[in-house]
Structure formats: C-alpha cells, structure tokens
Amino acid sequence: MDEFNYLSLEWFSPSKLQSFTWEHPVFLFLIATVPIMFFIRWAVRYYTNQKLMVAFTKDDLESSPLTWLRFIPDLVLALVFTLLLTALARPQNSNEKVEQTSEGIDIMIAIDVSQSMQIEDFKPNRLAVARKVAHNFIKGRLQDRIGIVVFSGDAFSLVPLTTDYNLLNSYLDELSFEMIETPGTAIGSAIAVVTNRMRLSNAKSKVCILLSDGDNTSGNIDPITSAELASSFNIKIYTIVVGKEGLVPFGKDFFGRPNMVENTVDESNMRKIADICHGQFFRATDNSALEQVFGKINEYEKAEIIETRFKDTTDFYFIYLRWGIIMLLLWLLLRSTLFSNILQD
C-alpha cells in the first residue's frame, strides 16, 4: 500500500469516490447528520450560555471579514467527522475473477443431406430447418467438443470434434444437397463414421445426434450392426426422424404450383438404433417439433460446470482515516490560536 500518494486531492474527486464499492454504506448517510449536529450544538449554546450585555454604537457593529475566521475551527471539525465516517464506510476496489471448468461432452451431429431433405413439409425445407436448429444447439453448449457428419448415399466427416464453434457454424451454413453425389440414405455408414471419430475419445460422455428423413437405402454397413459397434464404444445415439407421412410438397410444377408426392417412413430401424445405444428416439413433423427435440437433448446432455471465484479486494479506508487525523490535529491547533471565539467558549 506504500505506492499510494496519501496526500493527493484526487482521493476526493467525484470520479474516484464513484469508483469505490462501500462495505458499510450506512456511514455515508450519516455524513448528512454532521451539519445537523453542529446546528443543534449552536442552538444549545445560544439558548443556554450566559450572555454579557454590552452596549455598542452603530459604527462598532459593522462586520468585518475577519469575524468569519472564528468559524474555521468548526468547519475543520465537521471535516474531521466527515472523513472518519467515510473511513468507517470502508471504500474498496474489488477485482473478481471467475474460472469455469467442466468435463465436456463429445457430440457428433449426423445430418442427412439426401435429395428427400428438400421436401417442403418443413419451411423452407427439411435441411434448412435442421441447419437452423443445429446452430441453436451449438450456441447453447459450453466447452463441449462437437463434430459434424453428413450422409446421403455415402457418409463422411465434415468437421472433426472441436470447440471452435465459429468453424462449426460456418460449415453448417455450407450444407447442401450436392455435397454427396451418391444417391440414397446410408444410415449405417453414417454411424460407422461417427464411431470412428469417437472411438478414441476419453470424454465422460459420448453422444451422437442422428437426423434423417428416411430408411437405410444405401451403404455397405447394416445400421443395426453399426449401432452395436457404437454401443461397444459407449456412444449414446439420439435418433430423429423428420417429416410427415402422406402427401407432402416437393418442388413445383410448370405453373409454379407445389408438386405433391407420397412420403412414407419406416421408424423401426431408428427406434432400434436408439434402443441399442441407450439413447432415445424422436419424431418431428414440423419446425417447432424439431426445435423442441433438440431442446430436450440439450437438457439431457448437460455437463457439470464447476465455477471457482477469486475476489481480490483492496481497502482504502486508511487514506481517509489519515486525512481525518491530520484535520483533527489541525483543529486542536486552531483551538489554541486566535481563531477561537473566547467570548463564546
């Protein structure tokens, strides 16, 4: 604390006083009582002290600036009380640091980019909505490693497990139906790629979110076999089937009217995959339903966050206490000089 300039008048500037936090702010309100105390003291003396009747001429009663000097000791004493109350309020500066640590979760998001994801029972289409809810899901994660796998007739890893969420979002924006030329839906291949990416992970929890709108129609790996392999590496899989059954809009005809096509979904494989991998199966038939599904998964897979707070507090009461002592010594000195009102005292 020796580096402080105790005698600097900067300690009394409004900006400095506003920068403090006050441990006992009630003493600041007591400062307002200081002038009241001196008024009561004056009133008591005025009405109780003995008075000496002396006759003066009118010329003798003319005031002089020097007569005001007798109030200086009282002003200094009022300043002493103000400084002591300021010191009792304990002005402080605090720097608080927060450190958050958690055992992050490894999450792979496997998204179907097959041509059927262009169907417009979701607005504007299934893939666009899946991309949006994936963005929101990533936004709600903290310190988790997240990766992306895309699949159609084949599957590949688009983004490896990473905490660079800006990178993840940029790749999500680039999802398109032209990323994989092979037609079809290779769900088994997608699970195999996810397993390959996560098999060496040491994370406390390994999760895959598998989103598709159809049955496994391509790839050389059976989805159930892939799921059993994933389960052996303790990978939990949440499966989501998107889309309505029946007639759904898919593209437009010559006159700009929507083409209606028949859509059927066999949920059995997706349910089995979720069951084998100790996850959960979901069915989403519109935008809000898909958002709710991702919201539930986000709640299910919460990492425990340990928060440690460090608070470094510096007291400055001693500065105002020292000023108060200096003013008190000055007041005692003034009481012994011609500033005292001998007749009053």
Image (spheres, grey):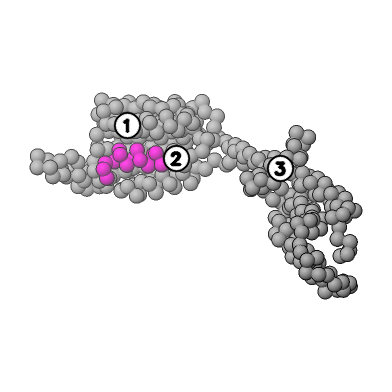
Whichever of labels 1 and 3 marks the residue nearer the N terminus, that label is 3
Q: Quadrant of the C terminus?
A: bottom right
Label 1 element class: loop
Q: For residue 333: magenta? A: no
**Side (left or right) of 328 relative to 27:** right
Across and down, in percent, residue 185 comes to 29, 32
Mark 2 nearby-residue class (10 Å; few <14, some 14–19, many ≥20):
few
Closest to the observer, 64 or 245: 64
Question: For the residue marked with disc 1, what is the amino acid?
Answer: Leu
Name the residue beneath numbered marker 1: 175
Please state the extent of the stretch shown in magenta in the rendering.
Answer: 123-136
What's the CA distance linking mark 2 and mark 3? 49 Å
Q: Residue beneath label 3, please?
A: 9
Is residue 20 positioned above or below 100 on the image? below
Q: Nearer the viewer, residue 21 or 307?
A: 21
The residue tagged 2 is 139
**Residue at position x 12%, y 42% in the image:** 256
Can you see residue 67? yes
Q: Residues within 10 Å of mark 1 (few under 14, many from 20)?
A: some
Mark 3, Cα crowd under 10 Å, few <14 / some 14-19 / many 20+, is few
**Quick one: which residue is furthest to the left in this view?**
255
Residue visible at 74% across and 44% down? 316
Question: Label 3 amino acid?
Answer: Leu
Please tell me whether mark 2 or mark 3 is closer to you in this view. 3
